[in-house]
Amino acid sequence: MEETRNHLSVTDLFRLSFRVFKTKPVRTFLTIMGMSVGIGTVMFLISMGYGLQFILIGKLVTTEDSLMALGVSYPAESELNINPATIESITKMPNVGEVSTMAEFPAEIKIEGATGLVVAKIISPSYFRLSGLMPDTGKAFKEDEKGIVLSSQAAKLLNLVPDQSSIGKELGLKLTYQGLNDQEGAGQEVILREPIKLVGIINDDTQAPFAFVSASAVDQKPPFYKEVLLKATNIDAVESLRDELIEQGFIISARVDLVNQAKKVMNIITTILGVFGIAALIVSAIGMFNTMIVGFLERIYEVGIMKSLGATDRDVKNLFLMESLLMGLSGGLGGVALGIAAGETVNFILSILAQRLGGAPIRLFITPIWFVITTLILSSMIGLIAGFWPAHRSTTLSPKEAFKTR
């Protein structure tokens, strides 16, 4: 009759594997802590990389439509402006979903005795959505709303404080449709009969004072335009539409290009941060590998007893692999907890500092769920790799050899 041998069940393997946490608690704790610190470092640095990428791209793309928008204009040296006929031909191009114009002229703004010269940009409300440029204080004007949005430089020029206290004030505006002498409407002055309400302020100290003026507030339609914003029908049509417009002699600016460049830069930064984190993880993995080898050498006699009592090579191998898997997974869970806790602590401190300085809360550390899951899988694999040699060595060890070590 053939002898049948029963293998250890998964429950038995778990129960026996947890013995190492009781028999060698200090060594096991230090090994798991070493893994946790290494994995926590990886989590901390990679989370910072994702946070920086999120902040940067969030600054570039404030609206979803701006990602599919193209800014169309003539080169500055050409001194050309876009006329209504050109806009009509652009609108009829394939893959063009929406068009928003911007006319730019010098203007004089008055308020309570203060006068300032600014660059007036006559736009429709859709321009804000397609450009991704939104007021930092107040709001953008709505369709058919006669409003104006000033830059912070323009507000200071009019002795206005660029904050919420200036919103709602009424301004007087005089435009000059200034252009080339042979252009229709050149030199024509347009004075708004009714005051125009200040609805928003954009923080921009890098450009000359400017103001976005609602097209509905201007009775006389601009004779020509400085820029046209086009929204492609879908994100895949942006590049083909851009190439076609460049062939027609236009200068094209697309946020999708900026976003792609930003992603490349941030991916490089995230990779560099990840390399430093992985270096710490390798050191902790070596420590775990050393612990598993020492543990095996101390338990050779125990392996001999298990085999003499009927344990198979597979049972002993699975026991060592289960112990290393549990230690690796425990180190992963501890590392994830340490990394997220450290990141959230820094986020909390930065948010408090930003609010005290008058800014918005900041989240510098962002941890994607998929990265947490990947980290736990990676830590478990490191545990299995660290336990592979002891597990394999235990299968080649006979009870006789094991008893000789006693």
Image (tube, rainbow, N blue to C red):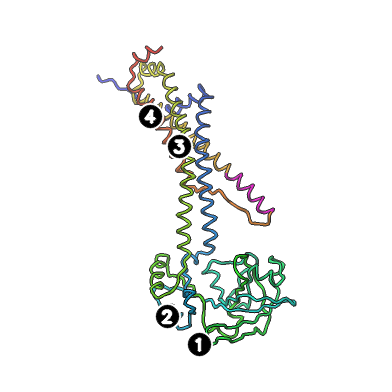
According to the image, label 2 marks what residue? 89
**270 relative position to 143: left or right:** left
Q: Quadrant of residue 172?
A: bottom right
406 in relation to 346, above or below = above
Q: Amino acid at mark 2?
A: Ser
Q: Residues within 10 Å of mark 4 (few under 14, many from 20)?
A: many
Disc 2 + disc 4, Cβ < 8 Å: no
According to the image, label 1 marks what residue? 182
Q: Residues within 10 Å of mark 1 (few under 14, many from 20)?
A: few
According to the image, label 3 marks what residue? 379
Distance CA(mark 2)–CA(mark 4):
69 Å
372 in relation to 115, above or below = above
**Residue 70: percent from left, percent from top:** 46, 69
Mark 2 or 4 closer to N-term? 2
Q: Nearer the viewer, residue 194 or 392?
A: 194
**Residue 190: percent from left, percent from top:** 62, 85
Residues in magenta, as a range: 343-356
